[in-house]
Structures are given as C-alpha cells and as structure tokens.
Image: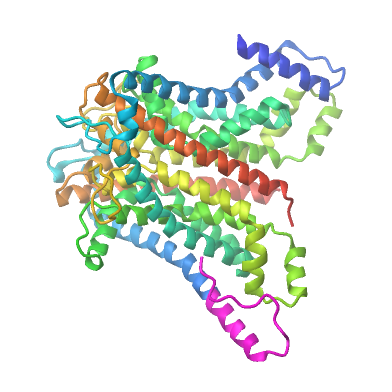
Amino acid sequence: MIFNSIAAGVARVVNGLGSGKRAETTLERLIQGGLVACGLLAIAVTVGIILVLIFETIEFFREVSIVDFFTQTEWTPLFIDKQYGIWPLVSGTILTSVIAISVALPFGLMAAIYLSEFAAPRTRTTVKPALELLAGVPTIVYGFFALTVVTPALQKVVPDLALFNALGPGIVMGIMIIPMISSLSEDAIYSVPVSLREAAYGLGAAKLPTIFRVVVPSAWSGIGAALTLAISRAIGETMIVAVAAGQQARIAIDPRAPIETMTSYIVNVAKGDVPTGTPEYRTIFAVGSMLFVLTLVMNLLSYRLAKRMRERGTR
Amino acid sequence: MSAPSKPPLLATPTDLTAKRSGILVERAFIWICRFAVILPLFLLLVLIGDVVIEGLGRINTDFLTGLPSRRAEQAGIWPALVGSLYLMVLTAVLALPLGVGAAVYLEEYGRRSRLAGIIEVAIANLAGVPSVIYGLLGLGLFVRFFAFGNSLIAGAATLALLVLPIVIMSSREALRTVPDSLREAAFGLGATRWQMIRRVVLPMSLPGILTGAILAISRAIGETAPLIVIGAVVYITFLPDGIDSEFTALPIQIYNWVSRPQEEFLTNAAAGIVVLMLTLLLLNSVAIYLRHRHQKRQ
C-alpha cells in the first residue's frame, strides 16, 4: 500500500517532467510501480538490518547490563563465569585491521601512483584487472593461505609466533584489500587536472615533487575514500580471522598471540551448539550491532569523500 | 608512504648534479612502485600454486561424488557441490529481477529525483555492510521471522540480498552505455517509456547486465560467513530435495575441513578449494567472453 502511493507520487512527477501529453496505460503504471518497489527494496534491506539488530540487541540488554557491556574488560559468555565486556573483541578487530591497513595502504598507494603516473596505457589496462583478481578470491581461500602458508613462513622469522595469531591473518587481509585502495586512489590521482601538473612543471618542478606535493595532495579526498572503505572492509572481514586468528578474546597488542575479533566471534558462536534464545546466543546480535555501527560510520564517511571527489570535476 | 627524500619543489637549472640525483631517485621510485604491484600478484600465484599442488592429487571421481566422512581419505564433496549449484540458481533467480528492476528505475525513471538519491545512499552503504551482518539479517528475518529454518531458500534469499548492490551497480553501468539519442528516437516513434526500455534499452545493455550478474553470482558462491550464521549444516549426508531442505555448500565444507587439526583434512580442504576456484574461473571466463563481445559490438 505504502509502496503504491509512493510509486504513484513518483510516477506523477516523472510524467510531468518527461512525456508531456502521452497517454499512460494502466500497464505502464503497474510496471513503473514494480520498478519503484525494486528500488525501495534497497531502503527496505537497510531498514531490515537495523530493525533485526536493534530488536535482538534490546532483548540482549534486558538480561545483560549495558554498562557492563561497555565498561568490563573480559569477554567470556561461553564460560561458566560469564563476563560481557565487548572491548577484548574490539581490540582484536582493531589489531588485525591495523596490521591489514599498514600492509594495504603503502602497497595500494604505490600501485595507484605507478599505474596513474608512470605505467604505459597498455600496462595500466592489464595490471588493473590483475590486481582486482586479489579481491575476487573467496575469503575462505585466504584463510587457508594464512593458516597453512603465511603463519608457518612467519614462524621461521618471528620468535614465539603462535599457530593462531593476529599477524598472519592481518597481513593476508592486507593483501586482499590492496586492490580496494589502489583502484579508488588510482581513479582519484588520474583525475587530477593536467593543468595542475603542467603548472608545477612550468615552475620547474621535477616529476616526483610534482606527484608528492601537487598531485597526491589534490587527490586526497579520493584517497581518503579508498582508505575509509578499506578500513570498513578490514573491520568486517570474517573468514580469514575465523580460520587463522584463534578464539581467545583478550585485550592485547601482541600480534603473535591468538586473539578473537567481533566477526570471528559471531561465526564461532553460530557454528557451535549454543542454544538459541539464551543471552549467550543473543551476544552475536549485540556484537553485530557494534560491528554494523563501526562499518556504517566508515561507509558514510567514504561515500561523502567519494562524492566530494566526483564534484571536483575531471581532467 | 615514504618519499625517497624531499627534493626542493623548484629545481634551479644550473644545479646539474642535483638534477641527476633527482633522476636517479625517480628511477628508484619507479622500481619500488613496480615491486609494490608485482609482489601481491606474485603472492597470489604462490597461493594458487600451493593450493593446486596440495589439492590436485586428491581430486578424483570418488572425491567429487562422495559423501562427507569422518575419515579424511573417504570424504567427498558431492552434497556441498550440489548445494552450491542450487544456491547459485536460486540466488540468481531472486537477485537478478530485483536488482535489474532497481537499476532500471534509478536510470530510466528516477534520474535526479529525491527518492532516487536516498536509494543511492542506501545502496552505497549496503555494498559496504560486512557479509556476516547479512547472515544476522538472514537469521532474524528468513530463518526465524518467516520460519524458513536453515533451508536452501533462506540461504539463497540471504545471498540474494548480499549481492543485490553489486547487481544494481553493474546493471546501472550497463544501462548508462546506451546513448540517449536511441531513447529519444524511440520516443520520437511514439513509444511509451516502458516500450522504449523493453525494446531498445534492455536488449542493448543485456550483455553488460549479464556480465555483472555473473560477477555477483561468483561472489555469492564464495561466501562462507553468512551461511554459517544462518545455520547451514556442516555435516550432511544427503542431497537437498527441495527449497525447504537443509543444505551445505562448498565454502562451508572447506571451512569445516580447514578447522580440523589433522593434516589429511587440510589436503581435503585444498582439493575443495581447487574445485571452488575452478567453478569461479569458469563463471568469470563466461563474463569476460560476454564483455569482450559487447565491447566489439560498440
């Protein structure tokens, strides 16, 4: 009902704009309404996610104190002595994300600068899709890679590295995120107007100073959009950490030890046999809400930055 | 990001040594950049090589058509393979009409309208929501509220919502390649908007839409986390017999094998990964072929 009335409203506006006096059949209107409904589905899904999370999280906080959730420093819902402090999971997520970003940012940015400023057009058109392949590999495959190749290799170099740790999965996650940073940053760097470069050259600047002092700074909003999107992706990445980072929720900065992230906690509870309807089980929705809020902030920031970049005009 | 050094913005033309060292620094920088491009691709090759070496020997008809087993050397992936195929078809059936419909609305009807603006923000945000959250949505909405249980249809519906933003964005891209002059020509001949879309715009953008659809589907069949969250069964010894049947899928079977300590199960996981990657490769080849044909025609 609501859909129909919105559809009718939209249809009236559109008809007024475009078609003048053309007769619109009932069929035309029905189809138009259906298409508007498809569009509204995107809003409905967003609302659906928020409603499910809020509903279950409220249920959770009826049984567990919200103050404990945000102030306690231990997370042991599945133990006999139950503690519900979210920070160990947040700390695990931050640790793996920081490792991932410190791999992905330098590599992604260098790749973007190379492809936009130095590479021949043909190299550009072959290397770009090749890098995108990195993002197309299923994350469970990366998890296998982190557990069976990267961690054993790192154990030869890093002393006291546990079989499950934050370092290996963090690095692998970083490799996966590289194309996300390089692709968006490359678009931003490439679209910096040629006139700016020429102005710098005209002042006698060499190529490198032009890149680092003129081109990259003018592309900052696009690079920022890429970075925030990458952070959001790292926070939400699930299978790599679920496979290779362990299951020990603790506040830690030592990347050699096992940790647990918000995402891997959700998977670990969901695959286990925790009875549904208990507060232990509802923790996954409370943790999910926290995860959703964190990624939402990053996504909206990225959307704003990318929009600013597009409005700047192109070369 | 480390600039090799900070050369002065303005080079004085007389200072030739500075200029030469500047060129050296630039050369070095280019090589560092090349390294930054090549290393990740090299690691990807190592990854694929490692998996193929470990898993290829394990793949035979018994493995492909066998049921899971507690003994690694007898375990097969038949139920997972069939489950993934069902999921693929169901997800496509659900996501494609809805996604293409939304894209047609945004490109052909809603251009610059306020509603379209809101929908666009929603899509941009949905594209960044972690897949595990879609799992929670599926659990709350399809498994519990609609009482689908841990069934194929619940899994497919969850995956359909997950790939919806991808379908919408790639379809919009395809619709935008149709020149406006063709739309105006259709209107000029007296076509209504829908006639114009159905006879002119959709046929022309079909290859592009299909390419995006295939990419979306290959994303869906590689997803693990949302299916675990909605409760897809890990150990299953029968084939799904309807959309309300319990199911398992390739990535879940792989995850199950990866999380066991015994070496033999890791070999099984590697073999499962080879099967999964071959499926993806097949899908993507079709997508590349379609895109190529499309580009040639334009």
Residue at 38%, 55% (x, y): give it.
A99
Numbered label tally: 0
Q: Is residue B7 above or below residue B293?
A: below
Q: Is residue B11 magenta?
A: yes
> Whole-percent x and y of residue B39?
43, 66
Looking at the rendering, the stretch of residues picked out in magenta corresponds to B1-29
> Whole-percent x and y of residue B59?
25, 49
Residue B297 appears in view: yes
Q: Quadrant of residue A214?
A: bottom right
Residue at 25%, 68% (x, y): give it.
A157
Q: Quadrant of residue B150?
A: top left
> Whole-percent x and y of residue A257?
23, 53
Q: Is residue A293 magenta?
A: no
- On screen, residue B276 versus residue B79, left or right, reads right
Residue at 29%, 41% (x, y): give it.
A88
Front-most of B57 and A6? A6
Q: Is residue A124 above or below residue A266?
A: below
Front-most of B241 and B259? B259
Residue at 62%, 42% (x, y): give it.
A304
Q: Which residue in the rendered view is the most extreme toward the top?
A: A1
> Whole-percent x and y of residue A175?
41, 56
